[in-house]
Image (cartoon, rainbow, N blue to C red):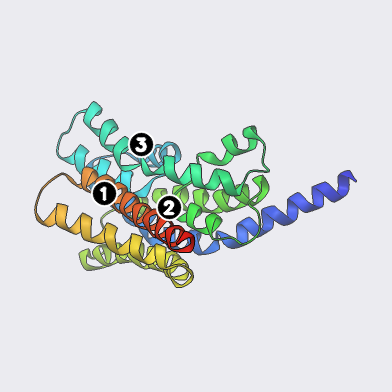
């Protein structure tokens, strides 16, 4: 009996590794670029790797580098990082429903590794999410991000500038690769993505608020609006059925 449980855990962990392979590859150029920029910003190798180890959030780390370069204070950096990552509360709450069979300790153990990409992969999995699946998914993604951050730093600024700039394009390609399958399955995801993009573009182009606030506001507004439209649609159907 115990051997069967161990075997199932191993299988789930392996599935997590396999699911995370695309994230691992996608993180490669983005983490390398982060390492390169971290060096030009003035961070040491240990500081660069430690940030990836403790933060593990691409957008927050990139924003932190720009704030450090601008001489921003510690409190402002921490607050901005919190605002940018506040969406993780929503992602964790959503994933909690899909992983309802897991223990609280197990969820706490892999919660640190929930990013936009790991959440997207786990949330779109048709099978139930388990602790060992998440550990495999998080492990390979986390290892790729941390290791390649260090490698990027060691590479330094020796690469041609055009190549350094082009590597950031992989971030958008990775998000597109994760988003498109979900958009094909649900119109709600399409509306949510389009609305969030429109709101964020409006806030940024109109210079109505800083980048961090623009992302948070666009996410919250689009989520609330899509949910409101869906609720009103359900109410309309109920009223039509009653009449």
Q: Is residue 116 visible?
A: yes
Residue at 45% x, 39% y: name it.
Answer: 53
Q: Which mark lies nearer to you, 2 or 1?
A: 1
Q: Secondary structure at mark 1?
A: helix
Disc 1 crowd rating (10 Å Cα; few below 14, some 14-19, many 20+) is: many
Report the residue marked by disc 2.
116
Q: Secondary structure at mark 3?
A: helix
Left or right: 137 with respect to 2?
A: left
Q: Which mark lies nearer to you, 3 or 1?
A: 1
Report the residue marked by disc 1.
215
- Choose top left, top right, bottom left or bottom right for residue 57: top left
Disc 2 crowd rating (10 Å Cα; few below 14, some 14-19, many 20+) is: some
Q: Is residue 35 visible?
A: no
Q: Earlier in the sequence, mark 3 or mark 2?
A: 3
Residue extending farthest to the right is: 1
Residue at 62% x, 56% y: name it.
Answer: 16
Mark 1 and mark 3 in contact (Cβ < 8 Å)? no
Percent position (x, y) of residue 62?
A: 28, 47
- Residue 99, compared with residue 174, is above or below; it is above
Viewer-side residue, 119 vs 193: 193
Percent position (x, y) of residue 2?
A: 87, 43
Viewer-side residue, 148 vs 118: 118
Left or right: 4 with respect to 238?
A: right
- What whole-number distance in Å separates the C-alpha atoms at marks 3 and 1? 26 Å
Q: Secondary structure at mark 2?
A: helix
Report the residue marked by disc 3.
47
Left or right: 10 with respect to 229?
A: right
Mark 1 and mark 2 in contact (Cβ < 8 Å)? no
- What whole-number distance in Å separates the C-alpha atoms at marks 3 and 2? 24 Å
Q: Earlier in the sequence, mark 2 or mark 1?
A: 2
Q: Which mark lies nearer to you, 3 or 2?
A: 2
């Amino acid at each position: 009996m115990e051997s069967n449980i161990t075997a199932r855990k191993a299988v789930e962990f392996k599935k997590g590794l396999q699911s995370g392979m695309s994230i691992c590859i996608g993180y490669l150029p983005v983490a390398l670029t982060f390492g390169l920029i971290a060096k030009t910003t003035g961070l040491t190798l240990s500081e660069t790797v430690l940030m990836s180890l403790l933060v593990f959030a691409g957008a927050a780390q990139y924003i932190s580098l720009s704030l450090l370069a601008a001489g921003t204070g510690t409190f402002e950096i921490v607050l901005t990082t919190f605002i940018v990552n506040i969406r993780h509360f929503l992602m964790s709450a959503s994933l909690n429903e899909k992983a309802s069979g897991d223990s609280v300790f197990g969820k706490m153990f892999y919660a640190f590794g929930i990013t936009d990409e790991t959440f997207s992969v786990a949330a779109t999995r048709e099978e139930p999410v388990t602790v060992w699946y998440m550990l495999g998914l998080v492990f390979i993604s986390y290892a790729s991000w941390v290791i390649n951050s260090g490698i990027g730093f060691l590479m330094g600024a020796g690469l041609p500038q055009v190549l350094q700039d082009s590597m950031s394009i992989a971030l958008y390609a990775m998000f597109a690769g994760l988003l498109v399958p979900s958009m094909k399955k649900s119109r709600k995801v399409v509306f949510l993505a389009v609305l969030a993009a429109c709101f964020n573009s409006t806030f940024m182009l109109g210079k109505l608020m800083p980048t961090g606030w623009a992302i948070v506001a666009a996410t919250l507004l689009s989520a609330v609006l899509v949910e409101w439209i869906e609720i009103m649609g359900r109410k309309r159907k109920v009223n039509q059925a009653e009449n």
